[in-house]
Every structure is written in C-alpha cells, then in structure tokens.
Amino acid sequence: MTPAIIITFCLLLLIAYIFNLTSGYTKIPSVILLLLLGWGIQQVTSYLEISLPSFSPILPVLATIGLVLIVLEGALELNLNKSKIGLITKSFFGALLPIIAMSFILSFAFQMAGGHSLKIALINAIPLSIISSAIAIPSVANLKDNQREFVIYESSLSDVMGVLFFNFIALNEDINQASFTFFGLQVLIMIIVSIIATFGLSFLLGKINHHVKFVPLILLVVLIYEISKVLHLPALIFILIFGLSLGNLHLFKGIKWLNKIKTDDFEEQIEKFKDLTIEGAFLLRALFFILFGYLIETSEVLNLATLPWSAGIVIVALILRFLQLKLSNIPIKPLLFVFPRGLITILLFIAILPEDHIPLVNRSLIIQIIILTALIMAGGIIANKEEKEEIDKQLKPEDSGAISQEI
C-alpha cells in the first residue's frame, strides 16, 4: 500500500507541474485542471470501489498554510518605488471598493431571500467578494508587465483586506464605535508585532550559517501567523509587511538595523528564500485544489437550485469589475475577466461557524462560482491573445509595404 501511495502522490504533483507549465500556452487556469484531476480520481476510486479515508480535515490545514505562502510569494514579488505609487493606489482601491460594494449588495440579496440579519448576511457574502491571488497571479504570467503587476498588487491586497473585513464582522457582536476602535488597536498591535518579527526573522536569515535555514524561517512565519490568528489579530498584515520588507530592501538604505544584519550574500539569500517560497506555494496550491476537486460531488456542480444564484453573483462581480477598471482609468481588456474566486473563498467559507451559515451559501454555490469565474478568466485571456495575434497579422502587410516604399 505504501509504494502505491508514494507513486500516486508523485504522479499527481508531476501532473500538476505540467498543468502549471502549459497554462501559459493553453490559457486554461491550472486550477480548473487540478479540480478536474481531483474529481476524476474520485470517480475512478468510486468505480473501482477503493476505500480511502476522509480527507476533509486536511483541507483547512492545506488552505491556511497555502494562504500564508501564496500571500508571502505575492508580497515578495511586489516592487515598491515612487513610480509605482499610482499603480499601488489604483490596486488598493481596486481591491477594497469592490469587496465592500459586492459584500453589501450580496448581503442585501441574502437578507431579502432569507430574512437574515445584516451581520450573518455579510459573513456569508464577504468570501464570495474576494479575488483569489492563488488563481489570479499564476494565470496572468504572460500578460504585459504593468497588467501583471496590477493583478499581483490587487489580488494580494484583496486577500488581506478581505480577511480583515471578514474577521472584523465575524468577531464583533455589535458594530459600533467601540468595535472600530478595538479593531484599529488590533491592527496597530499587529503592525508593531510585524515590524519586530520582520527584524528578528531578517536577522536570522542574515546570520544563520547552517545549511538548513529557509525551512525553519518559513515554519516561524507560519507559527507567528497562526498564533496571531488564535489571538484574533489581523495576521495577514504580518505576512504582507514581512514579504514587502524582504522584497524591497532598497527602501531601508541608511537604516542602522539593516547594516547589522546585512551580509555580503544577504540579497542572494533572499532570492533563495523567494525561490523556496514560490515552490512551497506551488506544492500547497496543487495539493489543495486536487484534494478539493476530489471532495467535489457531481451533484454539487450540477445543482440547478444554486446555479441561478451563482450566475447572478458572477454577473454582479463582472459589472463591478468593469466599473472599477473604468473609474481607475485602466484598460478593460483582458483585466475585465480576471476576478477569480478560489482558495481564500473556500478558507473563509470553512471558517464560518455552523450557526452563522446561510443554507443558500453552500458548497454547490462556492464550487459553481469558482468554476464560472475561472472559465470566464480563461475565455477572456484566450480571446485577448487571439485578438492581439489578429492585429499583429493585419499590421504586418502594412509595415512591409511601408518599408518597401521607403526603400
């Protein structure tokens, strides 16, 4: 049995790697293929009557660690400088305003449909309003640099602010001035903790000479994140600050603490840490979506009771996306179609307490929205590629004619 498990495990991850390699050419988001792979495994094991243990308890663990590594990966990739201020501002409001707008639109719809309180409706609406960096970032690898950077900023900030918004609503019995004050205090404490932890981890990164140094650092990052969560602090702020600090050392020139920890190969060590983070994020993302696909029931995907709701929610998200890009003066194509839901939606859905669950917001609705938004993104990117190739073909004869005339 053990050899079979090891062989299966290796084959699945190698297939996931192939999906990751080919997604840039096929424009099919790897998440769709991973979900199909997991679902296909479930169909095969069911047909062959192979009994497997329940993997449901593993899903939140993979989602949590995956979220940490994915946000850290995105933060490490973000390059902060004066020329990026406009892009960062657009990304910030592009992430924040649609989350707030869509959360309240959906919460109003849930209230009208089921008579739920505003708080319960918001708790169920927020997970559906967050762009998934786990799906968005890998899917735009072949877009223009400025488009790719916008998606990295926007989706990473969407994850962070979406979780903050969700925790604020879920952890406060009453929303009033005191709750806002307490939340602000929590954010301030988390920022201070993040700065101290970032200094400590950076010191370890620069000073540890042992050949094993990056895995303990990642374990410490996950540990600090999880302890912060237990204390109901906005833990993703730490991940964002730590990643941005390591990825943008040029902003801290002249600061004494950097000179204390910086060695000749410090930047090289950071690059190695980035590489390990990227590979770890790939591993966790692949395992998570394969496992989630395995746990999907066909009846959940084809649930006609939730399909009108999921289609309506996706249409609302698309309209808000269009308005956001228009108001931000950002080219519509192909970014209009890049608003996938995924890992963070599932993670927050799992985190909803049983007594706060709305029957309408169930696994079927979540799965359908994830699949629909991923298909729309794939279709939009493919159409944009074909349109670009067609324009290039049309321009070539004119260009050659112009060259001939000049000669």
Image (spheres, rainbow, N blue to C red):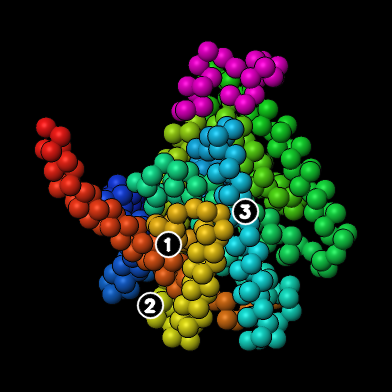
Name the residue furthest right. 178
Name the residue furthest front. 405
Task: Choose the circle earlier in sequence order: 2 or 1.
Answer: 2
- Which is nearer the eye, 398 or 27? 398
Quarter location, residue 107: bottom right
Does 330 appear above or below 116?
above
Tell me the number on the disc at residue 337: 1
Image quadrant occupied by the C terminus = top left
- Which is nearer the eye, 154 or 280? 154
Tell me the number on the disc at residue 298: 2
Q: Position of residue 235 (x, y in %)?
A: 68, 47
Tell me the number on the disc at residue 146: none
Does 272 appear above or below 288?
above
- Which is nearer the eye, 350 or 141? 141
The type of residue carrying mark 2 is: Thr
Disc 2 secondary structure class: helix
Question: On the picture, is 257 further left or further right than 221?
Answer: right
Measure the alpha-carbon separation of dots 1 and 3.
18 Å
Question: On the picture, is 312 further left or further right than 224?
Answer: left
Disc 1 secondary structure class: helix
The type of residue carrying mark 1 is: Phe
Residue 2: tell me if it is visible: no
For image coordinates 63% across by 19% down, the residue present is 253
Task: Choose the circle earlier in sequence order: 1 or 3.
Answer: 3
Q: Does the CB distance between marks 3 and 2 fall below 8 Å?
A: no
Task: Choose the circle earlier in sequence order: 3 or 2.
Answer: 3
Q: Which residues are magenta?
A: 250-272
Quarter location, residue 51: bottom left
